[in-house]
Amino acid sequence: MTAVQPGLAGEPGVRELLAGLGQDAAGDGSVITMRVAAAGLDAAVRRIAAHPGARLADVFASGGSPDTDAGPVTLRLVWALDADRRYLITESVIDGERYPSLSQVAPAAFAEECEIYEQFGIRPAGGGPLNRVALPPGAGPDWPRLGRAPAEPPDDVHAPHHVGGHAFEFPFGPVRQVAVESLYYGLVTSGEELVDLYLFTWHKHRGVEWRLRGATPRQALFQVERTEGLGAVGNAWAFAAAVEAALGLEPPPRAMAARAIALELERLYNHAAATAALCQSTGLVIGQAAAEIALERLLRVNAAVFGHRYLFGVVDVGGTRRDPDLAALRRDLSGAYGELRRAAEALLSTNSFLDRLEATGVLTQEAVRRLGLVGPVARGAGLAVDTRADHPGPPYGEFPPGVAVQEPGDVLARFRVMLAEAAESVRLIGEIAETGPGAGLAGPPAGGTGQTGRCGLGWAESCRGEALAWAALDGDGRITRARLRPAAVRNWRGFDDACRSQNVFTDIPIIEASFWLTVAGTSR
Amino acid sequence: MPLWTVRGLRRGVVTTRYPARPDPSADLLATPPAFRPDVLTRDLADRLAAVCPSRALARDGDVLVFDVGACTACGRCRAEAPQAAGASGEFELAATARAHLVKRIPLGGRPG
């Protein structure tokens, strides 16, 4: 029988959803955690998936480690109930090596089913093939894992397979260009049109989540913000928020304002970089140079305001570590953003550029929903998913962002979303810096209940979309399990769908630039 | 372009000096640390080596061994001991041999 705490879920819809789901529920209102028996997991997934606005945001496991936690594996599903402004976590203890298949109900869970098999050795019932997504082929039984090694290695993606007719397979990568991340494309083409595409992202696997075990939150934060260098603030904010939720810490408003300024600066420079990449992929060297000038100026703004071009070392557990230089912000930001705006205006009046973007890499809204995509990729397909608006925390509750949405789902729509977001970021930075609580150092984490042995969920709307993190601490305050789910983890799974949508070979770099993902973010 | 060619031929110099002028943004770059030997002690060197995430620092007897090639300029050592480590401001780190990037800094400080 489900016991729902009074006042836990105020909305009637959420209350109805929770009733009958599991055995008990806990949470502070914005995050609800429920235990669901493994036998009832399939029914629970069907029920939650049918809830209006429910989105499967992440699936991960803990326990089952011969080294640190020999108990049974616990499977956690993180659902974003965006319409209800809540996250719902279901916890299911899995005895044995099988659990009910999640991807049959929520297809977005397939990548995580594969990863959980590689890391914990448990697999969904049904016996379907699982792909290799996380660990490299040479990862034997002694390879560092979060849990036990699987009984058999997973299949390689699409291998063995046959390419018939006039199509042939074109292997590309993992070494592609200078300073571009390792990524292997398996391109199936008939010479011009792309028939199929699959990716290997495991070349960059670094075992970050494995390395975080036993670390203090601050030690871990150092590695978390380096997991994906182009998303340091978003991922660090999500992780710090997870630890703060576990410890009952509440950062002061000034620190949250500083975090928001850093997060919006990160969005700005990433969107400028994506603009430059779009120009490069379409062969517009003048446009690329103009966008890169804007990018360089924005990076210098970051360095002047927060002391680091890529905004490392800003977020701290319980607050922030660096005091923003608001005078430098006022002096430099408008000029740097002006460069980007001028480049964008020129590009938007260049037909040879727009022709390459329009109707390229189309993702339908249905596909975005089915795969649980986030960020500009989702918003470019008409889905207004933005944690700053859907799950607002300080200072976004006081300074709500305008969520930019475009309908067509093509590269041009994603580009327009990025440009609108860049303008909105400048507005938000100005408002938060000038009329907010003042942005400044938090000092040492204050408050807190002193509770340890707890866990928490954190999130932030990074430049690529919703970044999630979950952390569990032991009695000494050290991490027993940390889950990092940058937005790239979600959005790569939509990339092949976008590439297959009647595109030709040379469209792929354009689509990749419009997604503006990192391999490091998914291959962590 | 022709002017450049003529001027280069006349002066005998066909390349521009590097850098043509100081980069005003160079001060904003993260750079490896510069250590003050007179402040460094064995204990302090051990502390610095312990906080270095890329193992660029190690103590060898009464010498702090600093591998600049392994340093990522993360700033942890500067935060740990600001009295002993500051920003070097040096970001042009090319060397003709890998060994040239390893510095041996004598520990000249008195044990506290």
Image (cartoon, coloured by chain):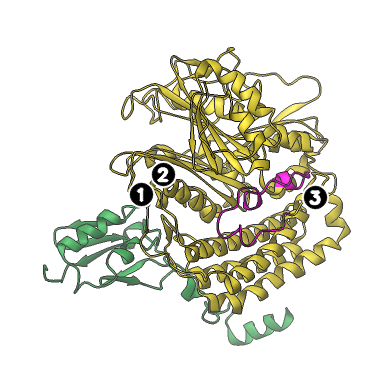
Chain colours: A yellow, B green
Q: Which residues are magenta?
A: A377-403
Crowd around label 1: few <14 · some 14–19 · many ≥20 (10 Å): few
Q: Nearer the viewer, residue A474 or A496?
A: A474
Q: Which mark is residue A449?
A: 1
* Mark 2, residue position: A246
Looking at the image, is mark 1 or mark 3 nearer the viewer? 1
**Chain for disc number 2:** A
Q: Residue furthest top?
A: A126
Label 3: state its secondary structure. loop
Q: Nearer the viewer, residue A225 or A204?
A: A225
* Sequence order check, earlier mark of 1 and 2: 2
Q: Is residue A201 left or right of residue A255?
A: right
Label 2: state its secondary structure. helix
**Residue visible at 78% across and 45% down?**
A382
Q: Are marks 2 and 3 on the same chain?
A: yes
Label 1: state its secondary structure. loop
Q: Which mark is residue A406?
A: 3
Residue A172 point in image, percent of width and height: 65, 37
**Residue visible at 75% across and 54% down?**
A404
